[in-house]
Image (cartoon, rainbow, N blue to C red):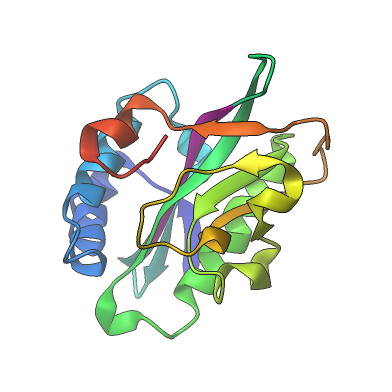
Amino acid sequence: MVIEPERPADHAAIRAVVLAAFVDQPRVADLVELIRASPEYLPELALVARVAGEVAGFVMVSHAELVGDSGERHQVLTLSPLAVAPALQGRGIGSALVPAALAEAARLGEQLVVLEGSPRYYPRFGFRDSRTFGIQITLPDWAAPEAGMVCPLPAYDPRVRGRLVYPPAFAATGTGHS
């Protein structure tokens, strides 16, 4: 397996992997394209995992904001989506993509990464309940409160707190719940 930043030639294969992984949520594939076209896009944090030269998995980390009680804004990162081709799930592809993205975000001097995800899966990568950091993530009604998660990176400043505000791409696809 090789993990590297996406290339324009990968876009169709990435869309196919995301559509297959999110078969009941096809707008997630649209989210990827909208983030790419936005100022929140970070090309070095849109990573593919290649198996036998083919795109087998994808993770995208992009900018979002936290808005504090006094209205102060802090730029943070959000991890969405993480997708692995269904036929290749359970083989460690997602477990390789997430740490690679977190390491690159840390190298770039970013403070923290937020996500909505499984509290059984993401803690192995350092994600913890966002509420313990004073960070509010509005979740869908069906999600457990601990599904709002944060991974602090080495540059994290604990004074960075507030309510997560997703970028417009999330609202346009109905995938963010600011």
Above or below: residue 76 compared with residue 70: below
Residue 160 screen position, x and y as percent: 75, 31
* Residue 172: % across, % down: 23, 31
Picture residue at 35% right of the left edge, 23% below the top: 38
Depicted 50 relative to depicted 15: above or below: below
Rendered position, 162 above or below 92: above
Taking the image as shown, residue 154 lies to the left or right of residue 15, namely: right
Q: Residue 16's image quarter?
A: bottom left
- Which quadrant holds residue 158? top right
Q: Residue at x 42, y 85 (%)?
A: 90
Residue 126 in the image, given as x and y percentages of width and height = 71, 63
Residue range in magenta is 58-66
The rendered magenta stretch, by its main secondary structure, is classed as strand
Q: Tell me where residue 21 appears, x and y as whole percent.
A: 26, 68
Residue 1 visible? The answer is no
User: Going by the image, does 44 lie left or right of 109?
Assistant: left
Q: Does the segment drawn in magenta span residue 5? A: no
Number of labelled discs? 0
Query: Which residue is depicted at the point 24% across and 46% down?
Result: 11
Q: Name the quadrant containing residue 9.
A: top left
Vertical arrangement, residue 90 with respect to residue 27, above or below: below
